Image: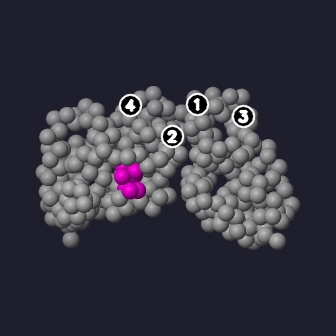
Amino acid sequence: MSAVTEYGLDSPAKALLVLVLSLKNCEPMNKLHFQKAILYFERMQQQKDIVFSNFHYGGVSYELQEDLDTLIEYGLIDKVGNKYTLTKEGERSAEELSKLYDCEALRKLAFVKQQLNDLPDKELLYLMYRLFPDTQINSTEFKKLDAEKQILIPRLFLKGRITAHMASEWLGMSECDFVESLSRAA
Amino acid sequence: MTLLNRFLEQHEQTYVFDTSTLILLFEKCGLVDAFAKFTQKNKLLVPSRVMEEFFAGKNAEHHRLAFQNCFTALNVDLADELLPYFNFDSTSGEIWVISYALKNPSCICVIDERFASSVCLAFSVTTIGAIGIIEEMKKEGILSPCDLQGIRDKIRNSRFYLSKILCDELDRICLDHK
């Protein structure tokens, strides 16, 4: 029996969990980061295969959390500290699964993991709130983080997570002034 | 074969420039003569959107004639597959630069921004930064040691942000005359 059938990986949430963990040399991810990575991916794909609701920390999916627990029970995912990683069986399943996904989707998933996985929580949350403003509804964090935007936005720009165009727009200044402000800060 | 294709074939390398690299090299460093020589061997392209951004700058207008002698303006078709990476916004110049490069894989994107470079990496598009262009000009013998020293000082003293790595790279290129 194929891993896809055996473990129910035909469900988008389960499949994306396994796939996102397999990318970037199977780099482990924590709960917040894979939630946000899959949300970002869904927005890039303009699809709503997974239900996200807007809670205190922005867009979050209970379905993903439940499927994560299921995949741990199946032995596809391991938890080490606060990070999740694929087991050997998980890696084998990811390989099978990746053949079913088109390369454009896999490219986007790899990109979001690359863009998000090394960000500290504050920068991650702020980036997501700004990229997808609808997720600010019900947030307990956005206002606090927005008060730190003068620090967070230049950091996100310097790390290559946003364009100068976005950064300047979010800060309400011209692109030229923004770039010059970086030079002064440096 | 179109006239543009025939023209491109006669040149060593095709570069397509983003706005910030043009501001740094053309405006801040004043490499007008160097670009006039560089364009004799290489094809230097600028998407219309980048052109608009560049000439929207405070000091760009009086460079227009020299600019037009060095760079060829392009009407680029947007590569729709790039839109999700730019949050479905096509206003920034980089998306147009990468769009051109996607359809013309032999050309090199001249981009300094890390975000756009990450997108290029995702699509296996070749990139170089403004400092890389200075190095190419040095290799082609367009810039003398004295020119390079002057460029280094201008960049170091300008209000243009360069990371520590790029500053070191600039020093290596401009101060090493072996």
Q: Considering only order in the chain, which callout, 3 or 1, is on the residue closer to the N terminus? A: 3
Seen at 60% across and 55% down, the residue is A105
Q: Do tag 4 and tag 3 residues touch (Cβ < 8 Å)?
A: no
Label 4 secondary element:
loop
Q: Which residue is mark 3?
A: A54
Subunit bearing disc 2: B
The amino acid at mark 4 is Ser
Q: Have a look at marks 1 and 3 and say if they share a chain.
A: yes
Q: Is residue B173 visible?
A: yes
Q: Which residue is mark 2?
A: B88
- Give x and y (percent) for residue A111: 56, 54
Subunit bearing disc 1: A
Q: Considering only order in the chain, which callout, 3 or 4, is on the residue closer to the N terminus? A: 3
For the rendered model, the colour scheme is: one colour
- Give x and y (percent) for residue A45: 60, 47
Seen at 40% across and 52% down, the residue is B98
Residue A174: give its label: 4
Foreground: disc 2 or disc 1 = 2
The amino acid at mark 3 is Asn
Q: Establish if A14 lies above or below A183.
A: below
The Cα–Cα distance between marks 1 and 3, rounded to whole angstroms, is 17 Å
